[in-house]
Image (tube, rainbow, N blue to C red):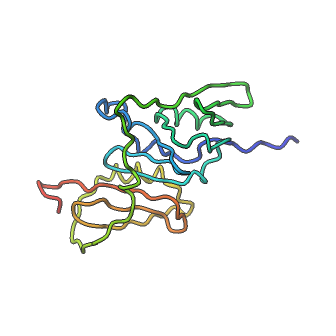
Amino acid sequence: MAEKKQKQTFNTKLYECCAGADDKLRPLFQCVHFENGYGMATDGMVAIKQTLALQSVIDMEELDGKSLHRDNYRAAMTFEMVQATPEGLQCWNENGQKAFLEYYQLREGEKIPDINRAVNPLTGIKTLSFIGINPDNITRLCKALYAPGGNIRIQFTGVDTPIIVDVIGVDEQQGIVMPVILNDSLF
């Protein structure tokens, strides 16, 4: 009996933290960005920075400095094999299905969101009584996190500052969720 090949593609749903197609004003928020061995995504309400060690894309180093639209990231996950090239992703299945998915090309004056700054732990943590959270934002972030035990850890940093989300034992990924206003107040 022939051995089944292990898929070599994206293994986590980072696209879940990207903005949707309806966000016409911020097209870069619709992309997963790759930098220094990490994949990062945000829609302005949630953000994630995750090590690429959790992915199994062939020639992953070619992703560095590139951005991939959320739809292309999701499409790549449907293939058994994905190879990063300088121009885009070469994708194929054993049944002969093939596709080439191009990277997002930055336009003049566009800069990727500073996700590194957003997900670094904050100092000056205050004790809180109440904080507003949109459960849909937590759900989307949890879909993108690699959490083999199924548990996440949440750190509240202030009433009007990001909520840090991580997974114990998975050191090279961090996420944030922004609090929401409830009854005209953050608390």
Above or below for 187 versus 38: below
Q: Quadrant of the N terminus?
A: top right
Above or below for 115 versus 58: below
Q: Spot the residue most to the right.
A: 1
Q: Residue at x 39, y 50 (%)?
A: 115
* Position of residue 149 measured from the top left corner of the image (x, y, whole percent): 55, 64
* Position of residue 87 measured from the top left corner of the image (x, y, whole percent): 58, 29
Q: Spot the residue most to the bottom.
A: 127
Q: Spot the residue most to the front.
A: 108
Quarter of the image for residue 120 reads bottom left
Q: Is residue 19 left or right of residue 159?
A: right
Quarter of the image for residue 31 reads top left
Q: Spot the residue most to the left.
A: 184
Q: Residue at x 73, y 25 (%)?
A: 96
Q: Is residue 187 left or right of residue 51?
A: left
* Position of residue 110 measured from the top left corner of the image (x, y, whole percent): 36, 34
Relative depth, front residue between 123 and 110: 110
